[in-house]
Image (cartoon, rainbow, N blue to C red):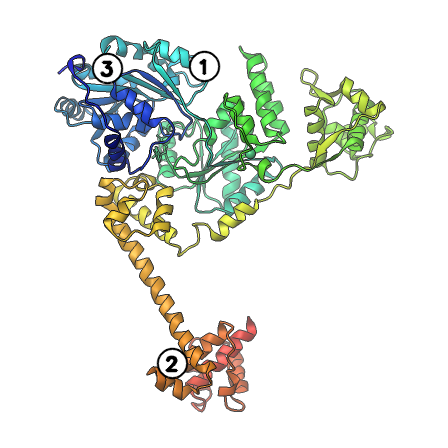
Amino acid sequence: MDNQNFTMPVYENDLLHSTLKKYFGFDSFRNQQEEIIRSVLDQKDCMVIMPTGGGKSICFQLPAVLLEGVTLVISPLIALMKDQVDGLRLNGIEAAYYNSSQEGPEQQQILEDVASSKLKLLYVAPESLKSLDPILRSRYISAIAIDEAHCISSWGHDFRPSYQQLSFLKASLPNTPIIALTATADKATRQDIMEQLGIPDAKQYLTSFDRKNIYLEVRPANDRVGQIMDFIAARPEQAGIIYCLSRKSTEQLQARLEQKGLKAHAYHAGLDFGERTQVQEDFIFDRVKVVCATVAFGMGIDKSNVRWVIHYNMPKNLEGYYQEIGRSGRDGSKARALLFHSYADVLQLRKFMVGAANEDLQMAKLDRMKQFSEASSCRRRILLSYFGELLETNCGNCDVCQNPPQFFDGTILAQKALSVMARLKEKEAMGTVIDVLRGSHNAHIMDKNYDSLPSYGIGKDVSWKDWQHYIIQLMDQGFCEIAFHEHNALRLTNFSKAVLFQGMKVQMSRPLLAKETPEARKETKSGPKKTGSLFERLRLLRLKLALEGNIPAYLIFSDATLKELEAERPLSENDFLSISGVGQRKMEVYGDAFISEIKAFMEEKDKGRKKSDTLMVTYGLYQDGLDVETIAQERNLKDTTIYSHLAQLYLQGKDVDLERFLAKGELEAIKKAHDVLEAPEGLKPYFEHLEEKIPYSSIRLALAIIEKEKQ
Ligand code: ADP
Ligand code: ZN
């Protein structure tokens, strides 16, 4: 049956929601997922623009399940197709990939599976499309999804020549809906994509770019390695990516982290294919938690439990920054983006850009990046406004919102800095300006006799880093400027004269202390990493099952799903199925294992509680004034058990007088034995050492007293 003659069934709300739950485990659609899915089901072409992690896949995967035939998914990265296909199969959806890594018979089998309607989705690289010719018929193909669609446009940031041949698809399958997906918001690129794909009138779905769960933070780049070590120490179980500017710096950073005892991989385009695949796999499979990478790393990696992204260096522009931080927190759970702001990086990036074809544009973009880093108001508002989205209120989830800058009258500081610039005849860069302010004796200063300037050393009391912070603010506010073409010399402006000679006031903000935020500390204390917590046990179970199945752990359940399991503790299949992220198939495959783990956890808790209950009964009777023999009789327990309860209660800090049960001299004798025997294990060594004259119960009590004294 050709699609032209096929009357589309009406897709009821219920059907869409039940399919979402059954196959993907989710209760509700995000953003515009539902509208997009309806449009594909109505066989309309569309263009989906969603941020990384926004939830693009479901927009074509869910229709694929409902439509007759197979949905082709064009995807640029062969290495990652397997991952996506594994994920679909775990959800009970028949899927396969088709690429040049496969042998002839395997490829033949796939073509047959398409013809016999076995497959719902087929992932294919653009260069392999040609050999799919026998099935490129509208009776087989229900829809075509073009993932990372910006690769088709030379305007985009990741142009791939192999994508250019995709225009033939619309021509040969005019009635098959095409859904193009990208995270690139740029208008010109979008239009170009649609034109090249032959779908110029496709409806565009531009969803919010806000990724609310990602905490945004910028810190000055001093002692980056130390800061990174602290950052990771606060969340050792979490996976994250550290982006660096160059290949070399990924390797250097990786080596320095390893030196400090942190296992990490380096990743960049200079590695050979095998090495790159290895790093990706180790990361995806949680064998290594930290990767120091160039921006080449991460595209198409769907690992949903990347919990943080650090920018060791400043990115070139906000598009890049946003795409990279978007790789964290895809599961919707809390994630963090930490950017190190270094002035040296800005200068370095500018240097790269000089002479580039679109130099002005690149410089302007870098400038916006810099403004974002130096912001003194909500960072998310700045970021989203760059993408054309206006937030009405401050986000509350960025460093500026949580720790608003404290402003003060910085006029004197400004006057000092500006007068040094004037004395240096506006010919020196920031480093020398600060050296003169601080009265440094370095060679450059001495060679040039700057130590004889009247303003030499007038800013001794302010640290180097703080001066940098203040001078950057002066630049941002237009009180001085940088002459990029003259060795980055700092120059005065009309404004500076007003500060120096006309009493103009300057507001400045204090530098923030770079340290782990209170929130991070809270995470470490009460967060999921606590060993023995249910979350931790479920995480380990997930890891075990992943190893057994040779699949990445996050494909089984996301961190968000584990969190919900921890909170809800479902004990029946029905309750288990109500958890977000649990679909029909996963409940069948994994339900038992997870439910048993939750049960075991709760039983152990229960035992623990019973134990403390029995102690409290003894304590109650003791407080009533009963002696040990009577308590033992009353409770039908042995005397020794009651003594042991009393010792435990005493150690818990309860008001129990143990000495009253000891005969004269017993405590001293046992203390002595404790020293002589050097605190042996168990009670027997004491019993024997004391020639069996002191009963076990007394030894037990005395040891509790000794232990308490040490606390
Ligand atoms: P993108 O391709 O846009 O980067 P994905 O399609 O990989 O994003 O989705 C990101 C994450 O969000 C995945 O872990 C996915 O399971 C999850 N997700 C998608 N849609 C929903 C939804 N409606 N409810 C809950 N989680 C969702
Ligand atoms: Zn904010």
Q: Under tag 1, what secondary structure?
A: helix
Of the two numbered discs 3 and 2 in the rendering, the one whose residue sits closer to the viewer: 3
Crowding around mark 3 (Cα neighbors within 10 Å: few <14, some 14 to 19, many 20+) is many
Residue 82 image point, x, y percent: 28, 31
Left or right of residue 478: residue 201: left
Does the residue tagged 1 have its C-beta within 8 Å of any atom of ligand 1? Answer: no
| Residue 677 visible | no
Position of residue 171 relative to residue 611, above or below, is above
Point out which mark residue 187 bears. 1
The mark found on residue 641 in the picture is 2
The amino acid sitting under disc 1 is: Lys
Quarter the C terminus occupies = bottom right
Q: Earlier in the sequence, mark 3 or mark 2?
A: 3
Q: Nearer the viewer, residue 607 or 294?
A: 607
Q: Which mark is residue 384?
A: none
Q: Secondary structure at mark 2?
A: helix
Earlier sequence position, callout 2 versus callout 1? 1
Amino acid type, residue under disc 3 in the picture: Thr
* Quarter of the figure with the N terminus: top left
Q: Nearer the viewer, mark 2 or mark 1?
A: 1
Question: Is residue 455 placed above or below 175 in the rendered structure?
Answer: below
Q: Is mark 3 within 8 Å of ligand 1?
A: no
Q: Quadrant of residue 25?
A: top left
> Residue visible at 76% across and 18% down?
493
Location of residue 687 in the rendering, given as x and y in whole percent from the top left corner: 43, 85
- As drawn, the label of residue 176 is 3
